[in-house]
Image: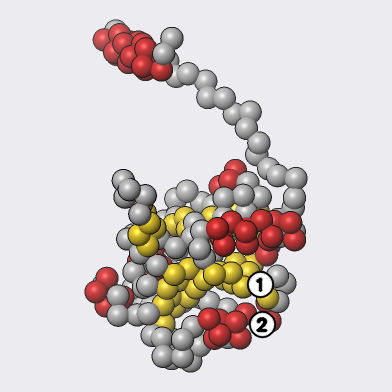
Amino acid sequence: MTSREIVLARIRSANAAATHGAPPSEPEVPRAYRVRGEHSPGTSELLDLLTGRLVDYRAGVHRCPTAAVPEVIAGVLPRTARLIVPSGLPDGWAPAGAVTDDGSLDPTALDAFDAVLTGCAAAVAETGTIALDGSAGQGRRAISLVPDRHVCVVRADQVVQTVPELLARLDPRRPLTLVSGPSATSDIELQRVEGVHGPRTLTVIIATG
């Protein structure tokens, strides 16, 4: 059977069952996919893989010891940048003059900021994806989408290998934002345009412990 025939057959079956008051049968979903990788979270192999993926996506990547994170943050941000940060960042991460978001700023006000600094909930190396869930140190979704530059700190122990491992670390009830490089899209002529749905510049700082 073709895919079209399979879909139509399922629709007819569901309609027939509904007509007779019976719930439609649900096909069994195959779950034999790989649920974890061969590397433990935070290993050098995963950090190398994540770095490579992010560079492919045109993100800037810096790896440093955790103690050096404030220095690296200061180095990647222009001195005159207006910076907004969520509450709950580790002490010392936010440079002097950064504005802590209190939830009252609308998109127009947020657009006046040059950059946002956040942490993350987890990251997956195989796809180069970083997940934010709106908890402490990450803030509401708007602050990570409206400013033109996003600086995101990822701890080494937050980096897993596979998507199932990433999902196992996330709470689906939270407002999840998945970031794979700077915001970008392409038109029918494959002309890449950055900054359409979020920041045009993504800088990731990987804190190696």
Looking at the image, residue 154 sits to the left or right of residue 194; the answer is right
Please name the residue shown 40% across and 67% down the image.
200
Which amino acid, by three-letter code, is at mark 1?
A: Arg
Q: How crowded is mark 1: few (under 14 residues within 10 Å), some or many (20 or more)?
A: many
Residue 32: give x, y in percent of width and height: 63, 28
Report the colour scheme. Answer: secondary structure
Residue 8: give x, y in percent of width and height: 33, 14
Residue 166: give x, y in percent of width and height: 59, 50
As rendered, which of 187 and 178 lies closer to the eye?
A: 187
Say which quarter of the image contains residue 100.
bottom left
Q: Nearer the viewer, mark 1 or mark 2?
A: 1
Which amino acid, by three-letter code, is at mark 2?
A: Ala
CA separation in Å, label 1 and label 2 = 10 Å
As rendered, which of 31 and 4 lies closer to the eye?
A: 4
Please name the residue shown 68% across and 81% down the image.
67
Check disc 2 and report the residue beneath it. Answer: 68
Q: In which quarter of the image is the N terminus?
A: top left
Q: Residue 145 carries which label?
A: none
Please name the residue shown 66% across and 72% down the image.
63
Residue 37: give x, y in percent of width and height: 70, 44
Q: What element carries label 2?
A: helix
Say which quarter of the image contains residue 121.
bottom right
Looking at the image, residue 17 sits to the left or right of residue 167; the answer is left
Q: What element carries label 1?
A: strand
Looking at the image, residue 209 sits to the left or right of residue 121; the answer is right
Q: Quadrant of the C terminus?
A: bottom right
Q: Residues within 10 Å of mark 2 (few under 14, many from 20)?
A: some
The mark nearer the N terminus, 1 or 2, is 1
Please name the residue shown 70% across and 70% down the image.
208
Q: Can residue 58 be seen in this view?
A: yes
Check disc 1 and report the residue beneath it. Answer: 63
